Image (spheres, rainbow, N blue to C red):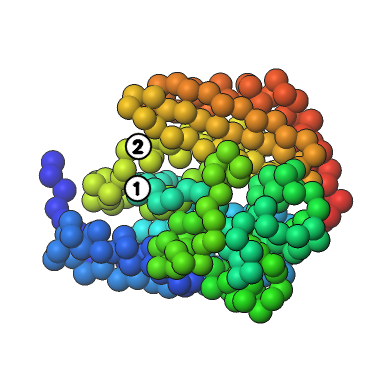
Amino acid sequence: MKISSPSKLVIASRESRLAMWQAEHVKAQLSLLYPHCNIEILGMTTRGDQILDRTLSKVGGKGLFVKELEVAMADGLADLAVHSLKDVPMDLPAGFELAAVLEREDPRDAFVSNDYASLDALPDGAILGTSSLRRQALIAARYPKLLIRPLRGNLDTRLGKLDRGEYAAIILAAAGLKRLGLPQRIRALIAPEQSLPAPGQGAMAIEIDSTRGDLRSWLAPLNHQATARAVLAERAVSRMFGGSCQIPLAAFAAIEGAAMRLRAMVATPDGQRIAAADATGPADNPEALARQIVELLQAQDASAILAACQVDAQADA
């Protein structure tokens, strides 16, 4: 049975400039598909936007950015929610699903500074800002004499803190800067070999109520298969390790032809202990490749590394 085109859709979104750009992008794509549909954006403030004085790992994790949007869908105030995929928990609440993953932007980390050209140029003792335990661990391993400090807030807030001189440099996702038309703020792009991206970094996802088969069908044309397969592998690695913000974990998959290369690492926050793995397998079986990577990491005592992370997290709580 053919499902009719939608007459009205409401998109729930965080109210940060980047989140609203993403919602507007999805709105534009849907408008091309369904020109007679009335599409609205419901802007919302999440707890993740409100709590800025502590790192995500200490206040509840990634779910702080999506809970309010899910409530809006459950209450019938919105039909779908648009997220940065790296902000989406590895396991969604019962009754919700990711209906589409859009084509990925640049997945790399970006070095941003007003005074220095690269990480190598930072002097000993320079203050570097990042919100990510993953970035903290990878940078601490290579640059142990830098002072790495927490950096919370939306993209504009973080840039403002840099511009006020609170940090010598900060690390941000390149995708957000490019989407907001700020590529000139990027002093250097950090290669995955130096800073492996977070699972889902650079990708956007659309979440829906899993009972909405109509929405699933309407959104299907927006799903980018190669990106969806790659991030499925990355998120599977994170899920197999517990999917916690308290774990410095990276996973990045790239597809070439029928093959997928998946790289991943887990580390202690100080970067002193790192397990890393690299494997290639069929692109159409991302879960199997993820399991292979996890086995390789476990062979390097990944469980002990994760146990050390949990001890550190409890000590900081």
Q: Residue at x 13, y 66 (%)?
A: 36
Label 1 close to label 2 by CB (< 8 Å) = yes
105, above or below 11, in the image: above
Give the side of residue 315 with respect to residue 49, left or right: right
What is the CA distance from the residue labelled 1 to the residue labelled 2? 8 Å
Q: Secondary structure at mark 1?
A: loop
146, above or below 240, in the image: below
Identity, as a three-letter code, of the amino acid under mark 2:
Ala
Mark 1 Cα within 10 Å, few/some/many (few <14, many 20+)? some
Q: Residue furthest right?
A: 315
Q: Residue at x 24, y 59 (%)?
A: 30
Q: Nearer the viewer, residue 10 or 313?
A: 313
* Image quadrant containing the N terminus: top left
Give the side of residue 216 with respect to residue 45, left or right: left
309, above or below 117, in the image: above
Residue 165 in the image: x percent, y percent?
69, 76
Q: Secondary structure at mark 2?
A: helix
Identity, as a three-letter code, of the amino acid under mark 1:
Glu
The quarter holding residue 112 reads: bottom right
Tell me which numbered mark, 1 or 2, is placed earlier along the sequence.
Answer: 1
Residue 51 in the image: x percent, y percent?
66, 69
Give the side of residue 259 with respect to residue 28, left or right: right
Q: Residue at x 40, y 51 (%)?
A: 105
Query: Which residue is tagged 1?
Result: 103
Observer able to see residue 5: yes
Indicate which disc residue 226 carries: 2
* Image quadrant containing the C terminus: bottom right
The quarter holding residue 164 reads: bottom right
